[in-house]
Amino acid sequence: VEQAARAASVARATAYRYFPNQRALLEATLPQLTQPSLLGDAPPEGAAERLGLVVEAIVQQAVEHEPALRTMLRLSLQPDRGDRGDLTFRKGRRITWIGEALEPLQARLTRRDFDRLVHAIAAAVGIDALVWLTDVAGLRRAEAVEVMRWSSRTLLRAALDELSNG
């Protein structure tokens, strides 16, 4: 917060009035994290197309805001501290967005299978997947993005195949 105050040429007290901690400052820089939907005004009807839109938005957020999201990820992994609070990052927005994308499948899948698919895809896309793919697996960002897209499509296809082969 102090660095942001210096960069913005405002008093520290002013900065802390609006952003009492690093979490609040990070959340203010990432307003799209609070979007209720990533599907837009006229979403497609098919689950695959809807999922493609949502995954693309999640992946682009991760790439475009990687430094801030890495910081939020780090904060979310710290033991409970007063400045961690109710991190937007920890509210499961990705699960909500992916669940909404897959709504056309809800009638065809059991609740357990639907939730499992949503959670599997959520684990395969986003900042945590990007960090692992680049830092641990050693992929370039473009490769990591393609792996996240491929993973989401493959998981959806596997779930649909299970339905067909029942």
Image (cartoon, rainbow, N blue to C red):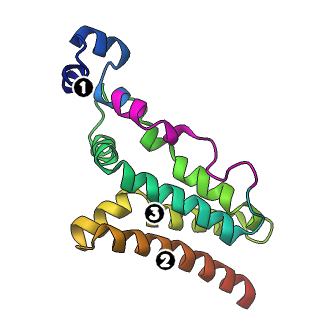
Magenta segment boundaries in residue numbering: 25-42
Residue 73 position, x and y percent, is: 32, 47
**Quadrant of the rendered image containing residue 130:** bottom left
Q: Amino acid at mark 1?
A: Ala
Residue 116 position, x and y percent, is: 58, 66
**Quadrant of the rendered image containing residue 128:** bottom left
Task: Give the alpha-carbon distance from disc 2 to disc 3, as whole Å.
Answer: 10 Å
Q: Amino acid at mark 2?
A: Trp
Q: Are marks 2 and 1 in contact (CB under 8 Å)?
A: no
Task: Give the alpha-carbon distance from disc 3 to disc 1, as whole Å.
Answer: 29 Å
Left or right, residue 53 beside residue 15 = right
Q: Quadrant of the N terminus?
A: top left
Specify whether residue 117 is painted magenta: no
Viewer-closest of 5 and 159: 5
Question: Which numbered marker is on residue 4?
Answer: 1
Q: Are marks 3 and 1 in contact (CB under 8 Å)?
A: no
Judging by the rendered image, the residue that carries numbered circle 2 is 150
| Category of crowding for the residue at label 1, using alpha-carbon neighbours closer than 10 angstroms: few (below 14), some (14–19), many (at least 20) | some
Q: Earlier in the sequence, mark 2 or mark 3?
A: 3
- Residue at (61% x, 75% y) in the render: 156
Judging by the rendered image, the residue that carries numbered circle 3 is 125
